[in-house]
Amino acid sequence: MMQKTVIEVSHLYKDYQTAAGPFPVLKDVNLRIESGDYVAIMGPSGSGKSTFMNILGCLDKPTKGQYVLDGHAVATMEENDVAGVRNKTIGFVFQGFNLLARSSLLDNVALPLVYSGIEKSERHARAKVLLEKVGLAKHIHSRPNQISGGQQQRVAIARALVNKPSLILADEPTGNLDSVTSEEIMALFGQLNQEGITIVLVTHETDIAEHAKRQVRFLDGKIVQDTRTHASQVLDSEIMP
Amino acid sequence: MFSAMLGEAWHAMSANRLRTFLTMLGMVIGVGAVVLMMAIGQGAEAAVKRSINAMGSNLFVVLSGPPNVGGARSATGNAPSLNVKDANAINDLDGVIGVAPVTMGKAQIVFGSNNWNTDIIGTTPSYLDVRAWYLTDGYAFSDSDIRSATRVALIGKTVAQNIFGDDIDPVGKTIRIKQSPFVVLGVLDSKGQTLDGRDQDDTIIVPLTTAQRKLFGNQLPGSVRQIIVQAESDKTMTMVEDGLNSLLNQRHNIREGADSDFSVRNLTAIANSAAETTRTMSLLLGAIASVSLLVGGIGIMNIMLVSVTERTREIGIRMAIGARQRDILMQFLLEAIMISIVGCLIGIGIGVAGAILVSTFTQAEVIVSSNSVIIAFSVAASIGVFFGFYPARKAAMLNPIEALRYQ
């Protein structure tokens, strides 16, 4: 069974400009992620995993190297087109939920559709479906500060899904949640992956990473380990040379 | 998408009502001041223009004198150096469409038990045309009244009020001027005050010959105090003035270089300078008011900069989920424009209300023209764009990663 490639990163370098000259953060990173996979990116702070995540999410550009996301050569794209990729191809889930405090849950979930130029009635219809899916149908007119952290993260997940992205990028999605709620959120991710959605999540907690089918470990700007959980049925994807 | 953004802008504005209101206040005061000041300035201009029109347009007045008796010169208007023949000659000049010789004086008038002292103007029927002065009642005297020096009179509004009161119709009644009976032929329309505040309606007009022979006497038969000359148009004024000077110099045998025994005054020029003064004043008022508009604009910029900083994280979120730079730019620009336009609308309301208050409490004429409203509105909208652009651009240029990390 041949899988479609969602992410293909080859020979990726990232330097930060400091007063003392360029400081390398990512050194020759290569990674391929197929459609339907569920990958946990791990590593201690300073290992470069957050920088890598930012590049995967098209929020930052590599200094050198190729990054192809769902067929788009992102590294060489115009800023406006990159915004389009963020809008349609990627769904973000953040540690701090990052919902708009003044807007209702419905408007929060529908917000990405505003930037896709979709009509209000359809925006609300689609947002409603997703809020039902994450179990918040009763709260669609509430404000983020009226619901719990776990519920806020569900709203954020609904927002990430609303534009039918090829990829969900989750940056420490359970970092601000207690263990019970974390389990619930991870169960939701597992369910979404079952439905065929590709998920990449960044975490430093091993038990969270266990939920994924594949664990990629960063250290000092390089991938040092790439393993699969035994239960995984996905085809092996080896580290590229 | 645009309507969604308008909604967002409205949302952002109503999220911090007091701040939005205070920011708007700068705009409200600025626009209100511009509208009010322009209304007052335009009112003053209109008042001046009306007095000019009331005077008659394109007028010269030729005054007799100053007489030069053995080197001692006395006031203009006192020498009997102009006469009716001069007036007839002037009438034949090119570019002249009306001539009215005038002699005048003061006299006591009586009707029944009422009496009044007023200006008596002796002149020809053309005086009414030249001064653009019409009758509200009755009819004017004619050339035959001039020929036979009949005792008829046209009376001004103020005179009619004072000797007839409201109840009696003056037309056809007989009044006494300096003891002689005069029949009132007509009542003059109200002219209001001159620029220097003289009541033009406190006047009686009688035939020139009647005034000369039967009221004021005369040192020289046929002499008049002044001749009012109306030029055909603005453009012929200079030509007529030159013509008047050379004609009268020639008729009065004034040698080249010698003092004339008459003087020609351009009434329109005096009036125009008065109009110019009010124009300058209203411009000045507008300019001062515009400064407050500018200050209002700076206030908007200030608050928008604060707002961008406060909402840095929100901007980061929006960028992460796919907002383009121009979406962010538009969002903040729209907010600034909305604040200034709403402020402007309130300001126009307050300016108009202020203008109405001023006109009720001071009786001063105040005109709110659609022009001034349109100008104030478009200036306010452009201020919104101008002062909103820098903060909006600052927001759009934020780095999404840093914006997301911002606490």
Image (tube, rainbow, N blue to C red):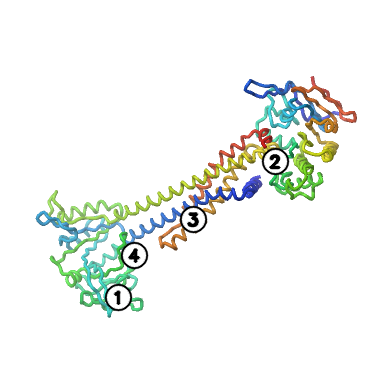
- Chain designation of label 1: B
Q: Are marks 4 and 3 in contact (CB under 8 Å)?
A: no
Pick whichever of labels 4 and 3 is earlier in the sequence.
4
Q: Amino acid at mark 3?
A: Gly
Q: Is B300 left, or right, of B206 in this rendering?
A: right
Q: Residues within 10 Å of mark 3 (few under 14, many from 20)?
A: many
Label 3 in the same subunit as label 1: yes
Residue B4 numbered mark, or none: none
Q: Identify residue for label 3.
A: B351
Label 1 in the same subunit as label 2: no
Q: For this rendering, which residue is in front, B296 or B373?
A: B296
Q: Residues within 10 Å of mark 1 (few under 14, many from 20)?
A: some
Image position of B315 with respect to A206: above or below? below
Q: Amino acid at mark 4?
A: Gly
Q: Position of residue B147 (x, y in %)?
A: 19, 71
Task: Measure the C-alpha gap from mark 4 to mark 3.
Answer: 29 Å
Q: State which quadrant residue B323 falls in.
A: top right
Image position of A217 with respect to A107: above or below? above
Extreme-right residue of the structure:
A231
Q: Identify residue for label 1.
A: B163
Q: Amino acid at mark 2?
A: Ser
Asked which secondary structure carries label 1, the reply is: helix
Q: Position of residue B162 (x, y in %)?
A: 31, 74
Q: State which quadrant residue B110 falls in.
A: bottom left
